[in-house]
Amino acid sequence: EKGGHDYFMLKEIEEQPSAIADTLRGHLVEGRIVLDEQRLSDQDLRDVDKVFVVACGTAYHSGLLAKYAIEHWTRLPVEIELASEFRYRDPVLDRSTLVVAISQSGETADTLEALRHAKEQKARVLAICNTNGAQIPRESDAVIYTHAGPEIGVAATKTFTAQVAANYLVGLALAQARGTKYPDEVVREFEQLEAVPQAVEEVLESLGAARALGQELAPSKAVLFLGRHVGFPVALEGALKLKELAYMHAEAFAAGELKHGPIALIEDGLPVVVVMPSPRGRAVLHSKLLSNIQEVKARGARTVVIAETGDETVKPFADHLFELPQVPTLLQPLVATVPLQVIAAEIARARGYDVDKPRNLAKSVTVE
Ligand code: F6R
Protein backbone atom coordinates (compact mmCIF):
# COMPACT_ATOMS: atom_id res chain seq x y z
CA GLU A 1 0.00 0.00 0.00
CA LYS A 2 2.98 2.29 -0.18
CA GLY A 3 1.75 3.08 -3.69
CA GLY A 4 4.97 1.90 -5.31
CA HIS A 5 7.12 3.96 -2.94
CA ASP A 6 9.98 2.71 -0.83
CA TYR A 7 8.42 4.10 2.31
CA PHE A 8 5.02 5.45 3.40
CA MET A 9 6.39 8.87 4.17
CA LEU A 10 7.19 9.51 0.51
CA LYS A 11 3.65 8.56 -0.43
CA GLU A 12 2.34 10.86 2.28
CA ILE A 13 4.55 13.70 1.10
CA GLU A 14 3.02 13.25 -2.34
CA GLU A 15 -0.49 13.27 -0.88
CA GLN A 16 -0.08 16.84 0.35
CA PRO A 17 -1.99 18.50 -2.51
CA SER A 18 -5.08 16.44 -1.72
CA ALA A 19 -4.57 16.77 2.05
CA ILE A 20 -4.67 20.56 1.69
CA ALA A 21 -7.55 20.56 -0.81
CA ASP A 22 -9.62 18.16 1.30
CA THR A 23 -9.00 20.25 4.41
CA LEU A 24 -10.28 23.39 2.68
CA ARG A 25 -13.25 21.72 1.04
CA GLY A 26 -16.67 22.75 2.34
CA HIS A 27 -15.35 25.61 4.46
CA LEU A 28 -16.55 28.38 2.20
CA VAL A 29 -20.35 28.35 2.08
CA GLU A 30 -22.16 31.18 0.32
CA GLY A 31 -19.16 33.42 0.69
CA ARG A 32 -18.62 32.72 4.37
CA ILE A 33 -16.03 30.63 6.21
CA VAL A 34 -17.60 27.90 8.33
CA LEU A 35 -15.99 25.63 10.90
CA ASP A 36 -16.74 21.90 11.28
CA GLU A 37 -18.23 21.77 14.73
CA GLN A 38 -19.16 25.06 16.19
CA ARG A 39 -20.52 25.51 19.66
CA LEU A 40 -19.36 29.14 19.64
CA SER A 41 -21.63 31.92 18.47
CA ASP A 42 -20.58 34.69 16.09
CA GLN A 43 -20.74 36.96 19.11
CA ASP A 44 -18.29 34.69 20.98
CA LEU A 45 -15.87 34.99 18.07
CA ARG A 46 -16.35 38.77 17.93
CA ASP A 47 -15.63 39.01 21.64
CA VAL A 48 -12.23 37.33 21.33
CA ASP A 49 -9.54 39.81 22.29
CA LYS A 50 -6.51 37.52 22.44
CA VAL A 51 -5.51 34.21 20.92
CA PHE A 52 -3.20 31.53 22.29
CA VAL A 53 -2.07 28.65 20.12
CA VAL A 54 -0.85 25.52 21.90
CA ALA A 55 0.68 22.44 20.29
CA CYS A 56 3.74 20.17 20.28
CA GLY A 57 6.42 19.28 17.76
CA THR A 58 5.40 19.66 14.16
CA ALA A 59 1.95 20.90 15.15
CA TYR A 60 3.71 23.67 17.10
CA HIS A 61 5.55 24.69 13.96
CA SER A 62 2.23 24.96 12.14
CA GLY A 63 1.02 27.06 15.07
CA LEU A 64 3.88 29.51 14.60
CA LEU A 65 2.48 30.14 11.15
CA ALA A 66 -1.01 30.63 12.61
CA LYS A 67 0.40 33.57 14.53
CA TYR A 68 1.58 35.36 11.38
CA ALA A 69 -1.73 34.82 9.58
CA ILE A 70 -4.11 35.58 12.46
CA GLU A 71 -2.28 38.74 13.52
CA HIS A 72 -2.08 39.94 9.93
CA TRP A 73 -5.73 39.33 9.12
CA THR A 74 -7.40 40.16 12.44
CA ARG A 75 -5.04 42.51 14.34
CA LEU A 76 -5.63 40.32 17.40
CA PRO A 77 -2.57 39.60 19.52
CA VAL A 78 -1.59 35.93 19.14
CA GLU A 79 0.76 34.00 21.38
CA ILE A 80 2.03 30.59 20.46
CA GLU A 81 3.23 28.31 23.18
CA LEU A 82 4.54 24.78 23.50
CA ALA A 83 1.64 22.88 25.07
CA SER A 84 3.97 21.27 27.60
CA GLU A 85 4.95 24.70 28.97
CA PHE A 86 1.62 26.47 28.79
CA ARG A 87 -0.12 25.51 32.02
CA TYR A 88 3.01 25.70 34.13
CA ARG A 89 3.37 29.45 33.79
CA ASP A 90 -0.02 30.86 34.74
CA PRO A 91 -0.99 32.31 31.37
CA VAL A 92 -3.48 35.18 31.43
CA LEU A 93 -6.76 33.69 30.23
CA ASP A 94 -10.42 34.62 30.45
CA ARG A 95 -13.65 34.15 28.52
CA SER A 96 -12.56 36.47 25.75
CA THR A 97 -9.43 34.41 25.11
CA LEU A 98 -9.50 31.91 22.28
CA VAL A 99 -7.12 28.98 22.70
CA VAL A 100 -6.39 27.06 19.51
CA ALA A 101 -5.13 23.53 20.22
CA ILE A 102 -3.50 21.86 17.23
CA SER A 103 -2.99 18.10 17.27
CA GLN A 104 -2.86 15.55 14.48
CA SER A 105 -3.77 12.66 16.78
CA GLY A 106 -6.07 14.63 19.03
CA GLU A 107 -4.72 12.57 21.92
CA THR A 108 -1.43 14.28 22.79
CA ALA A 109 -1.42 14.54 26.58
CA ASP A 110 0.48 17.83 26.75
CA THR A 111 -1.95 19.51 24.37
CA LEU A 112 -5.00 18.01 26.05
CA GLU A 113 -3.87 19.22 29.47
CA ALA A 114 -3.14 22.69 28.09
CA LEU A 115 -6.67 22.75 26.68
CA ARG A 116 -8.18 21.63 29.99
CA HIS A 117 -6.26 24.30 31.83
CA ALA A 118 -7.56 26.92 29.39
CA LYS A 119 -11.14 25.74 29.90
CA GLU A 120 -10.80 25.90 33.66
CA GLN A 121 -9.88 29.54 33.20
CA LYS A 122 -13.03 30.02 31.08
CA ALA A 123 -11.22 30.47 27.78
CA ARG A 124 -12.88 29.30 24.57
CA VAL A 125 -11.14 26.40 22.90
CA LEU A 126 -10.92 25.57 19.21
CA ALA A 127 -9.28 22.31 18.10
CA ILE A 128 -7.53 21.51 14.85
CA CYS A 129 -7.32 17.76 14.56
CA ASN A 130 -6.85 14.99 12.00
CA THR A 131 -8.71 12.31 13.95
CA ASN A 132 -12.47 12.24 14.15
CA GLY A 133 -13.83 11.89 17.63
CA ALA A 134 -10.47 12.14 19.40
CA GLN A 135 -10.31 13.56 22.91
CA ILE A 136 -9.06 17.04 22.04
CA PRO A 137 -11.89 17.86 19.60
CA ARG A 138 -14.40 16.24 21.97
CA GLU A 139 -13.45 18.67 24.72
CA SER A 140 -13.38 21.75 22.47
CA ASP A 141 -15.96 24.45 21.70
CA ALA A 142 -15.25 24.37 17.99
CA VAL A 143 -13.26 22.14 15.63
CA ILE A 144 -11.67 22.24 12.23
CA TYR A 145 -10.71 18.79 11.03
CA THR A 146 -7.70 18.39 8.79
CA HIS A 147 -8.56 15.83 6.13
CA ALA A 148 -5.09 14.48 5.51
CA GLY A 149 -6.20 10.87 5.93
CA PRO A 150 -4.34 8.43 8.19
CA GLU A 151 -0.62 9.14 8.49
CA ILE A 152 1.43 5.97 8.77
CA GLY A 153 4.89 7.53 8.79
CA VAL A 154 5.73 8.48 12.36
CA ALA A 155 7.15 11.81 11.22
CA ALA A 156 4.37 14.22 10.35
CA THR A 157 4.31 15.50 6.76
CA LYS A 158 0.90 15.83 5.13
CA THR A 159 -0.73 16.54 8.46
CA PHE A 160 1.61 19.53 8.86
CA THR A 161 0.59 21.22 5.62
CA ALA A 162 -3.05 20.37 6.30
CA GLN A 163 -2.71 21.97 9.75
CA VAL A 164 -1.32 25.12 8.20
CA ALA A 165 -4.33 25.30 5.87
CA ALA A 166 -6.69 24.76 8.82
CA ASN A 167 -4.91 27.43 10.87
CA TYR A 168 -5.47 29.88 8.06
CA LEU A 169 -9.17 29.01 8.06
CA VAL A 170 -9.26 29.96 11.74
CA GLY A 171 -7.64 33.27 10.86
CA LEU A 172 -10.16 33.95 8.13
CA ALA A 173 -13.10 32.94 10.36
CA LEU A 174 -11.91 35.41 13.00
CA ALA A 175 -11.32 38.15 10.42
CA GLN A 176 -14.83 37.59 9.10
CA ALA A 177 -16.41 37.70 12.57
CA ARG A 178 -14.47 40.83 13.56
CA GLY A 179 -14.92 42.57 10.24
CA THR A 180 -11.19 43.19 9.84
CA LYS A 181 -11.52 41.81 6.31
CA TYR A 182 -14.35 42.58 3.92
CA PRO A 183 -16.32 39.51 2.85
CA ASP A 184 -14.86 39.66 -0.67
CA GLU A 185 -11.33 39.81 0.78
CA VAL A 186 -12.02 36.71 2.85
CA VAL A 187 -13.22 34.93 -0.28
CA ARG A 188 -10.11 36.06 -2.18
CA GLU A 189 -7.78 34.76 0.56
CA PHE A 190 -9.65 31.46 0.55
CA GLU A 191 -9.29 31.19 -3.22
CA GLN A 192 -5.57 31.77 -2.95
CA LEU A 193 -5.41 28.93 -0.45
CA GLU A 194 -7.34 26.76 -2.89
CA ALA A 195 -4.62 27.36 -5.48
CA VAL A 196 -1.91 25.96 -3.19
CA PRO A 197 -2.40 22.25 -4.00
CA GLN A 198 -1.50 22.97 -7.64
CA ALA A 199 1.66 24.79 -6.51
CA VAL A 200 2.60 21.85 -4.28
CA GLU A 201 2.13 19.54 -7.29
CA GLU A 202 4.69 21.62 -9.15
CA VAL A 203 7.17 21.29 -6.30
CA LEU A 204 6.63 17.54 -6.17
CA GLU A 205 7.42 17.23 -9.85
CA SER A 206 10.89 18.65 -9.38
CA LEU A 207 12.08 16.65 -6.40
CA GLY A 208 14.56 14.35 -8.11
CA ALA A 209 17.32 16.75 -7.07
CA ALA A 210 16.23 16.58 -3.43
CA ARG A 211 16.67 12.82 -3.50
CA ALA A 212 20.16 13.14 -4.95
CA LEU A 213 21.05 15.78 -2.40
CA GLY A 214 19.98 13.44 0.38
CA GLN A 215 22.64 10.97 -0.74
CA GLU A 216 25.23 13.71 -0.85
CA LEU A 217 24.51 15.15 2.58
CA ALA A 218 24.19 11.79 4.36
CA PRO A 219 27.77 11.79 5.72
CA SER A 220 27.40 15.28 7.27
CA LYS A 221 27.57 15.60 11.06
CA ALA A 222 25.11 18.47 11.30
CA VAL A 223 22.93 20.73 9.21
CA LEU A 224 21.84 24.29 9.97
CA PHE A 225 18.61 25.84 8.71
CA LEU A 226 17.98 29.56 8.33
CA GLY A 227 14.77 31.43 7.62
CA ARG A 228 12.96 34.62 8.53
CA HIS A 229 9.31 35.57 8.99
CA VAL A 230 7.21 32.64 7.75
CA GLY A 231 10.40 30.96 6.54
CA PHE A 232 11.57 30.53 10.14
CA PRO A 233 8.93 27.92 11.11
CA VAL A 234 9.76 26.18 7.83
CA ALA A 235 13.40 26.07 8.90
CA LEU A 236 12.40 24.70 12.32
CA GLU A 237 10.30 22.00 10.69
CA GLY A 238 13.10 21.06 8.29
CA ALA A 239 15.47 20.68 11.23
CA LEU A 240 12.99 18.58 13.23
CA LYS A 241 12.45 16.22 10.30
CA LEU A 242 16.18 15.73 10.01
CA LYS A 243 16.61 14.98 13.73
CA GLU A 244 13.72 12.55 13.76
CA LEU A 245 14.51 10.66 10.58
CA ALA A 246 18.26 10.89 10.08
CA TYR A 247 19.30 11.19 13.75
CA MET A 248 21.42 14.09 12.69
CA HIS A 249 22.10 17.19 14.71
CA ALA A 250 20.06 19.88 13.04
CA GLU A 251 19.29 23.35 14.25
CA ALA A 252 17.20 26.18 12.85
CA PHE A 253 17.77 29.86 13.45
CA ALA A 254 15.88 32.98 12.60
CA ALA A 255 18.55 34.28 10.24
CA GLY A 256 18.78 37.64 11.99
CA GLU A 257 20.20 35.78 14.99
CA LEU A 258 23.13 34.43 13.00
CA LYS A 259 25.36 37.36 13.87
CA HIS A 260 24.39 37.09 17.55
CA GLY A 261 26.12 33.76 17.99
CA PRO A 262 25.39 30.87 15.65
CA ILE A 263 27.71 32.16 12.93
CA ALA A 264 30.53 30.80 15.09
CA LEU A 265 29.31 27.31 14.16
CA ILE A 266 29.97 27.77 10.46
CA GLU A 267 32.90 25.75 9.23
CA ASP A 268 34.16 24.30 6.01
CA GLY A 269 31.66 21.94 4.39
CA LEU A 270 28.82 22.47 6.90
CA PRO A 271 25.52 22.27 5.04
CA VAL A 272 23.35 25.35 5.60
CA VAL A 273 19.79 25.29 4.26
CA VAL A 274 18.35 28.74 3.64
CA VAL A 275 14.63 29.36 3.11
CA MET A 276 14.51 32.55 1.05
CA PRO A 277 11.56 34.93 1.10
CA SER A 278 10.12 36.20 -2.16
CA PRO A 279 12.16 39.06 -3.66
CA ARG A 280 8.82 40.59 -4.73
CA GLY A 281 6.79 40.12 -1.57
CA ARG A 282 9.51 40.60 1.03
CA ALA A 283 12.26 42.62 -0.62
CA VAL A 284 13.89 43.86 2.59
CA LEU A 285 14.06 40.45 4.23
CA HIS A 286 15.18 38.96 0.94
CA SER A 287 18.21 41.23 0.77
CA LYS A 288 19.09 40.47 4.41
CA LEU A 289 18.95 36.73 3.82
CA LEU A 290 20.98 37.13 0.66
CA SER A 291 23.72 38.71 2.81
CA ASN A 292 23.43 35.79 5.24
CA ILE A 293 23.97 33.30 2.45
CA GLN A 294 27.07 35.20 1.36
CA GLU A 295 28.35 35.32 4.94
CA VAL A 296 28.04 31.60 5.52
CA LYS A 297 29.38 30.77 2.08
CA ALA A 298 32.42 32.96 2.67
CA ARG A 299 33.11 30.79 5.76
CA GLY A 300 32.98 27.58 3.80
CA ALA A 301 29.37 26.47 4.25
CA ARG A 302 27.77 24.32 1.62
CA THR A 303 24.59 26.24 0.81
CA VAL A 304 21.25 24.67 -0.02
CA VAL A 305 18.88 27.42 -1.06
CA ILE A 306 15.10 27.18 -1.31
CA ALA A 307 13.97 30.19 -3.34
CA GLU A 308 11.21 31.46 -5.53
CA THR A 309 11.55 30.59 -9.17
CA GLY A 310 13.11 33.41 -11.16
CA ASP A 311 15.13 34.65 -8.18
CA GLU A 312 18.43 35.13 -10.02
CA THR A 313 20.17 36.86 -7.13
CA VAL A 314 20.68 33.68 -5.12
CA LYS A 315 22.22 31.66 -7.92
CA PRO A 316 25.86 32.70 -7.50
CA PHE A 317 25.78 31.66 -3.82
CA ALA A 318 23.72 28.48 -3.98
CA ASP A 319 25.61 25.19 -4.13
CA HIS A 320 22.19 23.55 -4.46
CA LEU A 321 19.05 25.40 -5.47
CA PHE A 322 15.41 24.38 -5.14
CA GLU A 323 12.95 26.59 -6.92
CA LEU A 324 9.43 27.19 -5.66
CA PRO A 325 6.44 28.46 -7.60
CA GLN A 326 5.45 32.05 -6.89
CA VAL A 327 2.78 32.15 -4.19
CA PRO A 328 1.65 34.84 -1.70
CA THR A 329 3.97 35.22 1.30
CA LEU A 330 1.75 33.55 3.90
CA LEU A 331 1.36 30.52 1.65
CA GLN A 332 5.04 30.01 0.91
CA PRO A 333 5.55 27.61 3.86
CA LEU A 334 3.11 25.20 2.25
CA VAL A 335 5.41 24.80 -0.73
CA ALA A 336 8.80 25.44 0.90
CA THR A 337 8.44 22.65 3.47
CA VAL A 338 8.08 19.95 0.83
CA PRO A 339 11.70 19.78 -0.40
CA LEU A 340 12.89 19.80 3.23
CA GLN A 341 10.72 16.77 4.01
CA VAL A 342 12.17 14.90 1.06
CA ILE A 343 15.77 15.86 1.81
CA ALA A 344 15.41 14.62 5.41
CA ALA A 345 13.82 11.34 4.33
CA GLU A 346 16.48 10.73 1.70
CA ILE A 347 19.35 11.46 4.09
CA ALA A 348 17.79 8.95 6.47
CA ARG A 349 17.45 6.39 3.74
CA ALA A 350 21.00 6.89 2.56
CA ARG A 351 22.10 6.29 6.14
CA GLY A 352 20.15 3.04 6.17
CA TYR A 353 17.42 4.03 8.63
CA ASP A 354 13.75 3.10 8.65
CA VAL A 355 12.11 6.28 7.44
CA ASP A 356 8.62 5.28 8.54
CA LYS A 357 9.59 4.14 12.03
CA PRO A 358 12.34 6.28 13.49
CA ARG A 359 13.86 5.02 16.73
CA ASN A 360 12.46 6.13 20.10
CA LEU A 361 9.41 7.87 18.62
CA ALA A 362 5.71 7.09 18.88
CA LYS A 363 3.03 8.41 16.58
CA SER A 364 0.84 9.49 19.42
CA VAL A 365 2.32 10.71 22.72
CA THR A 366 -0.27 10.11 25.41
CA VAL A 367 1.97 10.68 28.40
CA GLU A 368 3.04 14.07 29.69
C1 F6R B 1 6.95 15.28 14.23
C2 F6R B 1 5.89 14.65 15.00
C3 F6R B 1 5.65 15.13 16.39
C4 F6R B 1 4.19 15.52 16.56
C5 F6R B 1 3.88 15.91 18.00
C6 F6R B 1 2.44 16.37 18.17
O1 F6R B 1 7.13 14.69 13.00
O2 F6R B 1 5.21 13.81 14.51
O3 F6R B 1 6.49 16.21 16.71
O4 F6R B 1 3.93 16.60 15.69
O5 F6R B 1 4.13 14.80 18.83
O6 F6R B 1 1.56 15.34 17.83
P1 F6R B 1 0.03 15.63 17.60
O7 F6R B 1 -0.08 16.54 16.40
O8 F6R B 1 -0.63 14.31 17.36
O9 F6R B 1 -0.50 16.32 18.82
Image: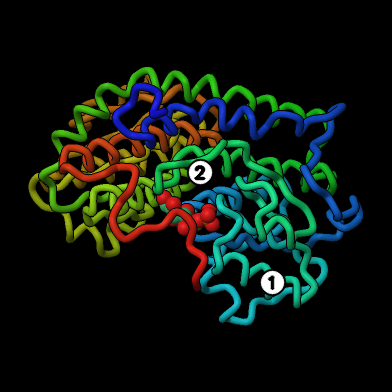
- Residue drawn 8% across the image and 48% down it: 268
Q: Is residue 201 above or below residue 144?
A: above
| SS at badge 2 | helix
Residue 324 falls left or right of residue 348: right
> Which residue is at a point 35% across and 52% down the rendered structure image?
240
Residue 114 percent coordinates (x, y): 62, 70
Residue labelled with disc 1: 116
Q: Residue at 62% across / 66% down in the picture?
A: 112
- The disc labelled 1 sits on which kind of residue? Arg
Secondary structure of residue under mark 1: helix
Q: Is residue 51 above or below residue 116?
A: above
Cβ(mark 2) to ligand 1 < 8 Å? yes
Is 175 situated above or below 318? below
Q: Which residue is mark 2?
A: 160
Mark 2: amino acid = Phe
Where residue 111 sits, quadrant-wise, is: bottom right
Q: Residue at x 73, y 58 (%)?
A: 138
Can you give x and y, in whole percent of width and height, for residue 159 in the image? Answer: 52, 42
Q: Is 119 situated left or right of 65 in this image?
A: right
Image mark count = 2
On the question of residue 187 being in view, the answer is: yes
Q: Is residue 60 visible?
A: no
**How many residues crowd around disc 2 within 10 Å: few (fewer than 14), some, or many (20 or more)?**
many
Residue 258, label in figure = none
**Residue 283 x %, y %:** 45, 35
Decide which of 240, 305 is in the foreground and name it.
240
Check the picture and name the quadrant holding the N terminus.
top left
Nearer the observer, 311 or 225: 225
